[in-house]
């Protein structure tokens, strides 16, 4: 248990430092050693939520309340995950359950109030990402047309279309800002595409003007030499040409400004922006490097130096040199940290990781690892087998059998929750894989979830009616229900979902009607919400239909 506590502490520390993947890793390792620790699932749920993996956050929250049904924080985790998934009604119910357990919990009260407000406001608002001509607008606008060729952007767009509430967590992403600008008809600053505002060093309204935007010379400003005054005038002419997309004229004016005032890096940055628009990325980088050198010599504002590094990163990103882009985004962050650059850096890191993952795939090596895992399994070294099966999955993540094999190891190690996840992934990849369904049934049986185990065995028998393991599993689950009615009732009553249904006055009335008039059941089953609740009671064994 000391090892579990140490891993939990490491996870907590990583979570506080916003190192979400590390936190998830430590919590997962702790859970493998202590599968019944509700706090570990709760903490991992928080880490998943912060990393944007809301489905996994919900899975862990549900596991938390299953293990500790009288713990308010578990329902708070569940409510949070459901809210992020846009399932506001369910989120409200989860928070309300948490308040019943801890009526004075201020955090749950505040969260419940926020979700209720969100539900009320969303009723009268349309989702800008769900318009019929969405893709036409995005393809026809130069700010977003290239995004549509990026699978990651399409995935982000789909999330925002189905769950507009997620927009609140995505506004730091410049792609989201640019997309909103197109859909709602306003201009936004786009640090990734070298937008016009950025190129001319002009920030949007209501912000302080950036240091490179020099005030127009005043007659009384004697510190400006005639050359500098003329350079500023040339820059303005360049900006006007840039707005008209007359890039050749813009370059002429910006280059003239550099000749007149070679110490001001603003003009070099504007030249780089023109080259970026013209897709002359190498020239863009050269101008930025020159700007950095001159800026260092003349003690330019660190924000300008940061902007030069960012533009180099953007150019490398456009050329497909993701690791080089990451280097220069990091250099920009070392000069001046901003949310926009942090978002760009996070995005590029994810893309690098995904490319490395894809490059790592090798079905031949996956089979080699599987054979090594099989031998370890035969030798009784289940932890060693897990390592080899995990490597096989990394090498070929779309082969269902590797997840099935690893699930068998987790079962031997008593890590039923990890085994169950592997089984679910296995049958998701191959719904006709009988062994995956049988293994899922066995794990659910081991977790005392006999109703779900029955379903898994039924699915297996539907695919292979003569499968001996599925038949035996189904028989043993049926015998359990026949011989342990009181145990079934106790477990059902400990289920938070069952408790919620039984506390519902409307459902109690319906159950009374069913006792007095069995025919009333047919009318109630026409209502999908009621039918779902009745199905849950039937599965729990608390209600029977004769």
Image: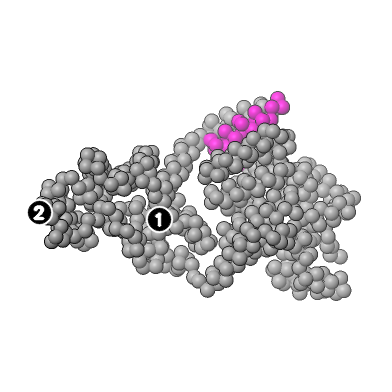
Q: Position of residue 299 (x, y in %)?
A: 25, 42
Q: Position of residue 446 (x, y in %)?
A: 77, 43
Depicted 153 relative to depicted 508: above or below: above
Label 2 vs label 1: CA separation? 42 Å
Q: Which residue is mark 2?
A: 226
| Residue bounds of the magenta highlight | 379-404
Residue at the image position 32 percent from the left and 59 percent from the top:
208
Q: Position of residue 110 (x, y in %)?
A: 61, 62
Q: Which residue is mark 1?
A: 175
In the foreground, 115 or 214: 214
Quadrant where the N terminus sits is top right
Name the quadrant containing residue 15.
top right
Mark 2 residue crowding within 10 angstroms, few (<14) / some (14–19) / many (20+): few
Residue at the image position 47 percent from the left and 56 percent from the top:
170
Colouring convention used in this rendered image of the protein? one colour
Q: Is residue 133 left or right of residue 306?
A: right
Q: Is residue 481 left or right of residue 225?
A: right
Q: Which residue occupies the extreme left position in the image? A: 226
The secondary element bearing badge 1 is classed as: helix
Residue at the image position 33 percent from the left and 63 percent from the top:
205
Depicted 109 relative to depicted 274: above or below: below
Q: Which residue occupies the extreme top position in the image? A: 379
Residue 311 showing in the rendered view: no
**Most prominent secondary structure in the magenta stretch?**
helix
In the foreground, 531 or 331: 331
């Amino acid at each position: 248990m000391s090892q579990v506590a140490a891993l939990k502490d490491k996870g907590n520390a990583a979570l506080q430092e916003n190192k979400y993947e590390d936190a998830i890793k430590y919590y997962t390792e702790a859970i493998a050693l202590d599968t019944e620790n509700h706090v570990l699932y709760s903490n991992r749920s928080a880490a998943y939520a912060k990393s944007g993996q809301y489905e996994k956050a919900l899975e862990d929250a549900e596991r938390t309340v299953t293990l500790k049904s009288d713990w308010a924080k578990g329902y708070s985790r569940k409510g949070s995950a459901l809210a992020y998934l846009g399932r506001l009604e369910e989120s409200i119910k989860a928070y309300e359950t948490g308040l019943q357990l801890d009526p004075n919990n201020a955090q749950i009260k505040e969260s419940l109030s926020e979700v209720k407000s969100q539900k009320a406001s969303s009723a009268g608002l349309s989702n800008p990402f769900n318009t019929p001509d969405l893709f036409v607008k995005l393809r026809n606008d130069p700010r977003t047309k290239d995004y549509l060729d990026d699978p990651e952007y399409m995935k982000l767009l789909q999330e925002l279309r189905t769950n507009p509430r997620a927009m609140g967590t995505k506004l730091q992403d410049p792609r989201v800002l640019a997309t909103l600008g197109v859909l709602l008809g306003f201009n936004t600053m786009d640090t990734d595409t070298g937008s016009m505002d950025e190129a001319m060093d002009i920030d949007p309204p209501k912000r302080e003007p950036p240091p490179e935007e020099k005030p127009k010379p005043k007659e009384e400003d004697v510190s400006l030499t005639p050359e500098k005054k003329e350079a500023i005038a040339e820059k303005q002419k360049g900006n006007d040409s840039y707005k008209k997309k007359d890039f050749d004229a813009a370059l002429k004016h910006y280059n003239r400004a550099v000749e007149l005032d070679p110490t001001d890096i603003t003009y070099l940055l504007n030249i780089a922006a023109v080259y970026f628009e013209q897709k002359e990325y190498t020239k863009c980088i050269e101008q930025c490097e020159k700007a950095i050198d001159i800026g260092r010599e003349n003690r330019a504002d660190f924000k300008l130096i940061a902007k030069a590094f960012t533009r180099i990163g953007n150019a490398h990103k456009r050329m497909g040199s993701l690791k080089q882009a990451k280097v220069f985004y990091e250099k920009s962050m070392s000069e001046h940290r901003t949310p926009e650059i942090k978002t760009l850096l996070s995005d590029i890191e994810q893309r690098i990781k995904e490319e490395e993952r894809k490059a790592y795939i090798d079905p031949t090596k996956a089979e080699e690892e599987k054979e090594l895992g099989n031998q370890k399994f035969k030798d009784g070294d289940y932890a060693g087998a897990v390592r080899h099966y995990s490597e096989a999955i990394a090498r070929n993540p779309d082969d269902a059998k590797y997840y099935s094999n690893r699930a068998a190891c987790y079962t031997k190690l008593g890590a039923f929750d990890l085994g169950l996840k592997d089984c679910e992934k296995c049958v998701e990849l191959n719904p006709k894989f009988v062994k995956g369904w049988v293994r899922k049934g066995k794990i659910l049986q081991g977790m005392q979830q006999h109703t779900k185990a029955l379903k898994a065995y039924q699915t297996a028998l539907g695919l292979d009616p003569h499968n001996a393991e599925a038949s035996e599993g189904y028989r043993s689950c049926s015998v359990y229900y026949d011989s342990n009615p009181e145990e079934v009732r106790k477990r059902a009553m400990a289920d938070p979902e069952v408790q919620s249904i039984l506390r519902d006055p409307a459902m109690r009335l319906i159950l009374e009607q069913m006792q007095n008039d069995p025919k009333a059941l047919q009318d109630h089953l026409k209502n999908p919400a009621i039918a779902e609740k009745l199905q849950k009671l039937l599965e729990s064994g608390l209600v029977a239909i004769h």
